[in-house]
Image (cartoon, rainbow, N blue to C red):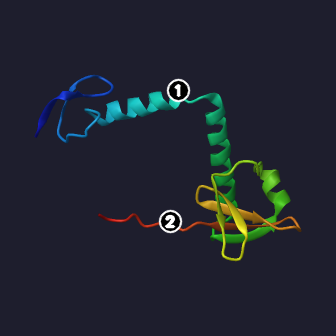
Amino acid sequence: MLKNPRNKCLVCQSPLVGRRDKRFCTDSCRSIHHQQLKKELPPVIKRVNQILLSNREILAELNPEGKKTLSRDTLLRKGFDFRHFTHQVRTRTGNTYQFCYDQGYIIFEDDKVVLVRQEQETPKRK
């Protein structure tokens, strides 16, 4: 193993052994570091993240097959918050779907909502 004397663990300051770009000496230190970063988030970010995750759970629960039509009221009764979503996708036909991570929806004028699931992209290998 390589020893790089100028690299120290970001948490405990132990010398790092191994890869040059290594930042933590153990999984425990890596976990501690990321938990500390999470605690530092402003309350507004924590709240929005909670809403986004809740929205995604509601969509996934109601749409196990990958595509489903239901009423807007059904989502509202479950506690869905239409003001928060992660991204939008515009189709070739001009429709715009809102997504909460991989779970999406589009609302039509008659208050019908079509739920869809975005397919996972296969990571590119180098």
Q: Which residue is mark 2?
A: 120
Q: Residue 104 at what x, y percent from top left?
A: 66, 62
Q: Which residue is mark 1?
A: 40
Q: Looking at numbered disc 1 in the image, what kind of residue is underneath it?
A: Glu
Sequence order check: which comes first, mark 1 or mark 2? 1
Residue 30: quarter of image: top left
Q: Residue 13 at what x, y percent from top left?
A: 26, 22
* Left/right of residue 57 with respect to residue 5 in the rendered view: right
In this rendering, the answer to whether 120 lies above or below 46 is below
Secondary element at tag 1: loop
Cα gap from disc 1 to disc 2, whole angstroms: 30 Å
Q: Residue 57 at what x, y percent from top left?
A: 64, 53
Position of the N terminus by quadrant: top left
Residue at image location 46% in from the left, 27% down from the top: 36
In this rendering, the answer to whether 97 lies above or below 37 is below
Residue 91: quarter of image: bottom right
Residue at image location 62% in from the left, 35% down from the top: 45
Q: Looking at numbered disc 2 in the image, what kind of residue is underneath it?
A: Gln
Residue at image location 32% in from the left, 65% down from the top: 125
Secondary element at tag 2: loop
Position of the C terminus by quadrant: bottom left
